[in-house]
Every structure is written in C-alpha cells, then in structure tokens.
Image: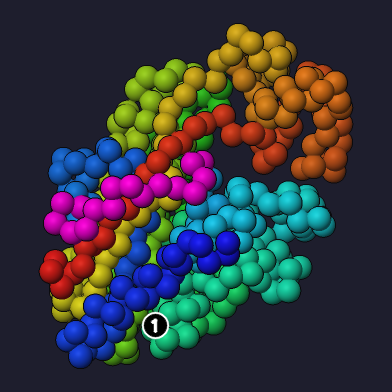
Amino acid sequence: MRRAITLLSASMIALTAGAASAQNAKPRNLILFVPDGLRGGIVTPETAPAMAEIRDKGVHFKNSHSLFPTFTMANSSALSTGHYLGDTGTFSNTIYTGYTSVPAGDTVVPFIENDAVLADIDDHFSGDYLNEETLLKMARGQGFSTAAIGKVGPTLLFDHTDRGKNTIVVDDSTGGKTGVPLSDEMKEALTKAGLPLATPSRGDNAKAGDAKTPGTTVANVAQQAYMADVATKVVLPMFKARNKPFVLVFWSRDPDGSQHNTGDSLNTITPGINGPTSMAGIKNADNNLAQLRKALDELGLSATTNIMVSSDHGFSTISKESKTSPSAKIAYDDTPKDFLPMGFLAIDLAKALNLPLFDPNDKNAKVADNAHPRPATACSARTRRSLMSWSRPTAART
C-alpha cells in the first residue's frame, strides 16, 4: 500500500532528468510553483494570465485533486514526498505528538506551520517525523542545487531535516529567532542584491479581523515581492553560476492568505472569495510566477527548465450560521448570535455523547458551558474542494 501511489517526488525528478536523456544533455531544471488555496476554475487569461498560459500551452492535469480538501500541511506532506497521508502521518495543520511541544506553547497538538515546531517534532521522532524522503532531499542526492521559498511551514517541509545546511530556505521566519539560518553565501548574495536578510511581515494582509471587525482588504504583495526578488535576483543567478541542474519550490501564500483574511464579507457569504481582496491575492501569486518566468528568460534558463504549477487545495465561502447545531444555541462573547463558534464540532459531539470537553491547548482544562476551545483545536468551519495542477515542459514551451 505504501507504494500504491506513484511517488510525486520521483515523478518530478524523472520529469526533470528524463526529458534531457533524448538530447544527451544534463538533467533539466524544475520549478514547482504552489499558489496556496487556488481554485483551478478561477484561472482565466484575465484573472491570472501567467498561470492560464502555462495551462493552455502546456500539460493540463484535469483530474488533479487534493488528498485533504482543507489543510495545507497535509497536502504539503503529499507534494513534498509523493506519499499518502497515512504514510506521512500529517492529516492536518496540527498533529498529535504525545508530548507537550515547547515551541508551540506546551501543547500536545501543535500547529505545524512553524519552523521551530517542525524541528521540535523531528527531534522527538528520530530526526524525521514524516519518515519519508522528500523531493528536495532526493534531488540533492542526485546532485541538484535545491531551494524552497515561500509560506512558512509547507516551504520547509520539502527539506525539513536539512534545515538550510544544503537547501536554501527562505520563508516568513527568515532572519527571525525561529527561522532557518541563512548561509554566508546567501547573506552575501542578498546584501549584494540590495535585499534585507529578514523577510518583511505581511503588514495589513495579516489582519484577520473578527466577528465585529472586517479583515484585510489588500493582498500579500510586499512579503511575496521580497520572496520573488530573492528567487529571481539571488537564487536563480546563483544556480546558473553553479552550472548544475536545480529544483526550486516556490510556495505562494496568496491567494490562501488573502482569502482567509478577506475583509470584503463580514459575516456574509457575498462577495466571499470572489471579492476584490481575494482576486487581488490571485493576481499577486500570478505576478510572482510571471516574474520567475521572466528571470528564466533573462538568465537563459527557460529552454532547460520545466515549471509545474499545482495548488494544494481549493477554497470556498460558506455560512457559519446554524439553526440546529447545539453550539450555535449558546451565547459566546466573541461569536454573533446563531453563528457557529470555533470548535463547534467538538462541542456538538461532546453534547451528543454527554461527555465533558477538554482543551489540549489550554493544558487540558475543561471547556466551560458558555465557552469554546481555543482556535488551534477547533474544527475548521470552512470547506474547500478540489484544485488544479498544470505543467509546462519549457522546451516546448509549465
């Protein structure tokens, strides 16, 4: 069963190396671009021209789907290893560890979109909690230069046991206390390119809002512009100078981040993820992809580089109102009347089974009758569905 699925990582390496065999040339380069939370059907020449061109002129995998329709880290474990969730043990953005994770705030269910938490889990599980070889580790073993740039969590997962020793890692935490250290080579190259050694914050894009205050109305432009600059002005020129094949993963937080935090639909489902903030997030990710393609052209790498575009999951807007859920009949300070609170499923199950409810993120304290669990342990009140995956073999012109 462990090998029932064709390994994505092996397939990517084969795609890169095999395409060159007929030409008796060195192995081809590969860029995996992941627009987090992108719905395939929303991509058109107007909304996302760079992605649309790759899909329409390249190979379109029409039946691509997520292994888990909601959670980034679950799907990241599949994209980074090619294995089912039962092999990696990553079924969510949190994981049950069986011990209290200090970097996660002394909880047994840590949120794993965090570099320090991933390191902590690795340390407690024989150095590799996934227990499967990742794409970038495999590529390194074949002599490829490797880099992972983008959203904290899924980015590091592609070579989490290396932690920046060989694979270049740049994410939200770069330059901070919990970030993966940069090599002296990267520090020098960033400084020479006029780029800071620390990733800028999301700024207003990070404003999630709450039940009374709208969230963000801007995309994650500044942070992702930095990451795109790192990829195109530092990493790709560095890889070209090495004169070796490379694999680069670029995990775009947008449109997922802007869709989650959108301030266009406070307590309503209209316009939802079709509002201007979400659409700006899609365009932002598309601009990053276009910048990568432009850099490949300017560096003379287009003819030897394959680009694969694959979102990790889809996204949809739902109502959080309910007339039947027991949790919606309770008054909470932070939840509008008749709306579902965080952890509504846990609350409903506890009431249906007539059992007490405890919060593992609050030292297993009992959840009071008029309270709900803390967010990290709550059931997600969103639904997301299938995604997209495209590839353009650059020789023919992902």
Residue 147 at x, y = what percent?
A: 42, 74
Residue occupying the point 44% across, 65% down? 6
Q: Is residue 295 visible?
A: no
Q: Is residue 69 magenta?
A: yes
Sort mark 1 into few (<14), some (14-19) or many (20+) by Cα contacts within 10 Å: many
Residue 127 at x, y = what percent?
A: 69, 74
Q: Which quarter of the rendered picture does the N terminus lie within?
A: bottom right
What residue is disc 1 on? 145
Name the one closer to the observer, 179 or 203: 179
Residue 274 at x, y = what percent?
A: 32, 29
Residue occupying the point 45% across, 48% down? 66
Name the one closer to the observer, 173 or 168: 168
Vertical comparison of 206 with 198: above or below: above
Residue occupying the point 19% across, 49% down? 52
Vertical comparison of 262 with 311: above or below: above
Q: Is residue 335 magenta?
A: no
